[in-house]
Image (tube, rainbow, N blue to C red):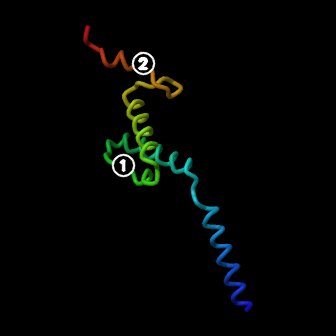
Amino acid sequence: MRHTIALLATTLLLAGAAVGCSKSYDDTVNDCTKALAAQFEEDGKGKPDACKDVKEDDYSAILMNQIMGDEGWLDEDGRFDKGKFYEDAFDGEQ
């Protein structure tokens, strides 16, 4: 009986530790953002492994933000800047 109780207590403690150690979705998204930025610097292609647990809509938004930043279309606060976009779009065409 004592062995059963000890085994049950150990199992419950391990299950609680596993739940407590799992990453939050926000942490997963942050890791994906960092991995995607590193991949862009290395001219890599495809979806990084760190992004596999990110919802597709969220991944699309992260990817689009990375592309806009890479093109220089974001302001200093990380928001889309139409002026920078139009300046780039019409550069040399007058």
Classify 30 as above or below 65: below
The residue where tag 2 is placed is 82
Q: Secondary structure at mark 1?
A: loop
- Towards the viewer: 61 or 28: 61
The image shows residue 59 at horizontal and vertical percentages of 43, 44
Residue 65, image x, y percentages:
43, 34
| Depicted 83 relative to depicted 71: above or below | above
Q: State yes or no: discs 1 and 2 in contact (Cβ < 8 Å).
A: no
Q: Where 2 falls versus 54 (above or below)?
A: below
Nearer to me, 69 or 13: 13
Mark sitting earlier along the chain (1/2): 1
Q: For label 1, count other residues whose C-alpha is less than 10 Å away and answer few (under 14), some (14-19) or many (20+).
A: some
Residue at the far left in the pictured view: 93
Q: Residue at 42% across / 46% down in the picture? A: 56
- Estimate the x, y position of residue 28 in percent, counting from the top left: 52, 51
Mark 2 is on which residue type? Lys
Rendered-image quadrant of the N terminus:
bottom right
Which residue lies most toward the top here? 94
Query: Horizontally, is 92 left or right of 50 in the view?
Result: left
The residue sitting at 64% across, 62% down in the picture is 20
Instruction: Name the quadrant of the C terminus.
Output: top left
In space, the residues marked 1 and 2 are separated at their CA atoms by 28 Å
**Residue at 39% across, 50% down:** 48
The residue located at (31%, 46%) in the rendering is 45
Q: Amino acid at mark 1?
A: Lys
Q: Which residue is mark 1?
A: 47
